[in-house]
Image (tube, helix red, strand yellow):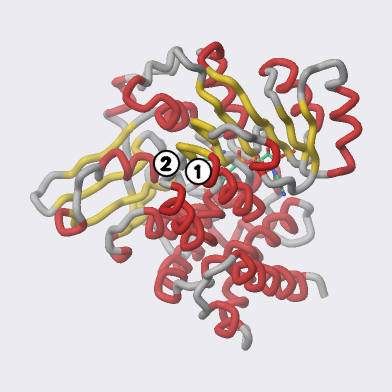
Amino acid sequence: MKKRNIAILGSTGSIGTSTLEVIKKKRSKFNIELLTANNNYKKLIEQAKIFKPNNVLINNKKHYKKVKKGLKNKKIKIYFGNVPLNNIISNKLDYTMSAIVGVAGLQPTIEAIKISKIVAIANKESIICGWEILSKFIKRYKTKVLPVDSEHFSIMELTKGISDSEIEEIIITASGGPFLNIPNKKLNRIKPNQAINHPNWKMGKKISVDSANLMNKVFEVIEASKIFKFNKKKYRIIIHPESYVHSIVRFKNGLIKMILYNTDMKIPISNTLYGKRNHILNIKKIDSKVLSKLSFQNVNSNQFPSIKLVNKCLNLGFLAPTIVNASNEVLVNLFLTKKIGFLDIVRTINKIFKDKDFNKYAKRKPDTIKDIQIADNWARLKTLTMCVR
Ligand code: NDP
């Protein structure tokens, strides 16, 4: 059988590494065209030696020579910076995993859509900020796009062939993160290593902080409202500390369906890769005793004030999600480098909404990447000036 041509954007990250682990089980079935990273040249070199891709790209130019040295005598082409993917890859790809973190993933995702039959999107920021633009390319290039985020992957599975009129409610679950039972007012002295220590998932630092204050759920509802054609008022978030149930759909005919699986991103990843013929091995089975201990609770907005941003973003639409995303990216970095406290993240995003220029930037239709960049740049600068005085 013909090998499948694939690319992994952000191969050195948590999702990228899991994707390679899934591929490793059936390595002979794949021809890896491209692996990419930003700074982690050591891991990129290590992955290239093991997986023998035809091309690697390191985004940060300062590491180019190190990658070149590390892979000398190997038949691998090495690129740096924002090289368009179609300059690197000439054959149509069968599958691309879009797993760069942040809005930096938007342009590469657009390029992947142009040259791939299937694009699995983990990079939620490109959906939140650029779905209107992605959709145009998805249509034009007839690309199949599959969400990787566990909640969206589950909603997709639960609603195949279902219309909006059949659905009462779509519930996205949240674990509540590491601070579920710590009163909100005690959280300002939280250290970055406490915030990234998620009880159930092992993820990149940015998404781990987003999970600790539930900003991740704000983004997930926006993400779902973009990907799926269902009424955006039907989404609800509930806390499910065990994280086995990823999404729940309540139908008007009285049925409730939910999808459960272990907290292992290799499960949605391998499903996007293999579809119905998915026979991934060695996935830990859910112990039946666990099923008697599943618990659910409403989200307390005093504990997680971020949750009020969901409606603000959905009601405003346009570039409001881009502004919140950009501001959040800056704030998470400031928090991780100990320049602001944990609670300052959501506090500052709320201040951005009240800024006199907010409406000017938020209430525009995002038609081009430039439109997104203008709102994104404004939000980043505004956030920095608010925090670093
Ligand atoms: P990581 O931080 O672990 O990895 C991010 C990847 O993107 C790395 O390969 C990194 O390279 C690369 N990267 C970072 N910045 C840039 C840039 N400016 N240009 C090019 N490449 C860049 O993130 P995750 O794997 O956790 O998350 C990836 C995406 O998937 C995010 O959007 C996240 O929200 C989403 N997601 C993640 C889940 C998870 O379980 N981890 C679950 C669901 C969604 P380098 O290593 O060199 O820095």
Rendered image: mark on residue 146: 2
Which residue occupies the extreme bottom position in the image?
356
Give percent across and percent down for residue 107: 63, 53
Give percent across and percent down for residue 341: 70, 60
Q: Secondary structure at mark 1?
A: strand
Residue underneath mark 1: 121
The amino acid sitting under disc 1 is Ile
239 left or right, relative to 248: right
Q: Residue at x 45, y 63 (%)?
A: 307
Give percent across and percent down for residue 38: 75, 41
**20 to 97, vertically: above or below:** above
150 left or right, relative to 353: left
Circle 1 crowding by C-alpha within 10 Å: few under 14, some 14–19, many from 20: many
Circle 2 crowding by C-alpha within 10 Å: few under 14, some 14–19, many from 20: many
Which residue occupies the extreme front position in the image?
90
Q: Residue at x 78, y 24 (%)?
A: 45
Q: Residue at x 45, y 72 (%)?
A: 317
Query: Quick one: quadrant of the N terminus?
Result: top left
- Label 1 vs label 2: CA separation? 6 Å
Ligand 1 quadrant in view:
top right
Q: Are marks 1 and 2 in contact (CB under 8 Å)?
A: yes
Q: Earlier in the sequence, mark 1 or mark 2?
A: 1
Q: Residue at x 81, y 17 (%)?
A: 74
| Residue in front for this viewpoint, 16 or 373 | 373
229 left or right, relative to 217: left
13 left or right, relative to 124: right
- Is ligand 1 less than 8 Å from the beta carbon at label 2? no
